[in-house]
Amino acid sequence: MSRKVYITGLGIVSSIGMNIEETFESLLAKKSGIKKPKHLTSVHKNDFVLGEIDISIDDLKNRLNIPENEAYSRTSMLGMLAAREAVNNAGIDNINEYKTGLLSASTVGGMDRSELYYRDFLTNDTHNKYIDIHHCGDNTEKIARDLGIKDFTSTISTACSSSINTIMFGARLIKMGILDRVIAGGVDALSKFTLNGFNTLMILDKEHCRPFDETRVGLNLGEGAGFVVIEADDIVNKSGKKPICEVSGYANANDAYHQTASSPDGNGAFMAMTNALKISGLSANDIDYVNVHGTGTNNNDLSEGIALKRLFGDNVPPFSSTKGYTGHTLGAAGAIETIFSALAIQNQVTYPNLNFKNTINDLGISPQTEVDKNSEVKHVLSNSFGFGGNNSTIILSKINNN
């Protein structure tokens, strides 16, 4: 079955906005959400700046009308907010009118709650309800129940490429006729384990991160949720709604180089981008903007930059990392940045790479540093790369009659 896959709805929660409108305003205003954390409990919380969402667990429960005694993780609730917005943004009144699935990604799962009671688990069962919400699948189950989705659910956890892979998997399910519509994306909340773990890896920046800058020293962690509604073209045409853009290409590749490091020649990134272009039917010259993974670590930015030069040669298109806005939101990053890419096409705008000053000596290419409202944006390529060599790329395209 040959079907095109369109994005018809967007939903997002991050440190730069609690919805699409707030988020887009922050992108245009070059407003970063990275600051000292207020809600995270950690002995290291004052050592680092983070992309924390300024809302408490209690406020999340109140906003979502969740009973106080029910066990919900911060991760689940952030995901519910973003998924609800995506469905509403797509104008969906009856979630089960067509065969609809939910694909949700996470790396933290319910750890933000379960880790608080770890010592209690060893001595008593007072907080045992938090054991059941520890795994990543709990987020998916709660979001699916909140939306009323019954046809298909699945959870993907491939490190920081997780949520691009949900969109890719969803697109394949639609193209094969298994589903008509998918709510796809990911969510991760900040946790002690994550902060302490990345600190142990010595890849955190205590100041604001500087992706693709010669002086970069590491990343800023963030939290957030992003979901897109993707639908088959025949369903969209029948409804008469106006889609935002097309999911024209996608690919996942693994260079099997190292548990946490990218290959120095950018093999994984190059393969993912090349294969995504093949699926899209586009050439490298067709890409108008690249939302790079751009974590701000020495290894990632150099490796990704080398891959860009291998793919585009001397004609690397405008590119930028948006992690200077939100921090690295881990399993949610791919979906959040896919949403940024969809907004770029919808509004014909591209974004700056915050905090950049110095070109990487070994690369000789520099990211975009200002908001650009004057360039024509037909095709956007977005990268998300994760530990274990999990490299994923998605390509979004403007629809001809859009």
Image (tube, grey):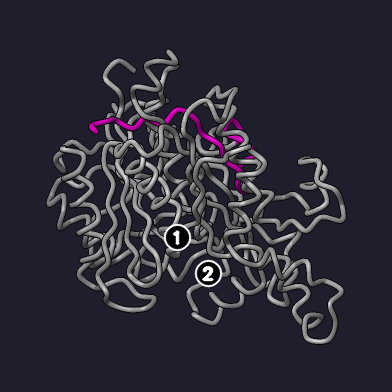
Query: 224 or 17: which is nearer to us?
Result: 224
Q: What residue sits right under mark 1 in the picture? A: 210
Query: 285 or 117: which is nearer to us?
Result: 117
Find out whether residue 15 is within the magenta segment: yes
Residue 191 placement, left or right of 214: right
- Image location of residue 84, percent across then percent down: 62, 36
Instruction: Using the image, determine if residue 396 lies above or below residue 202.
Output: above
Residue 110: name its quadrant.
bottom right
Q: Can residue 283 be seen in this view?
A: yes
Kind of residue at badge 1: Arg
Residue 245 placement, left or right of 379: right
Residue drawn at x 23%, y 43% is 317
Q: What residue sits right under mark 2 in the picture? A: 205
- Decide: marks 2, 1 in contact (CB < 8 A)? yes
Residue 357 placement, left or right of 14: left
Q: In which quarter of the image is the N terminus?
A: top left
Stretch of the chain drawn in magenta: 1-22
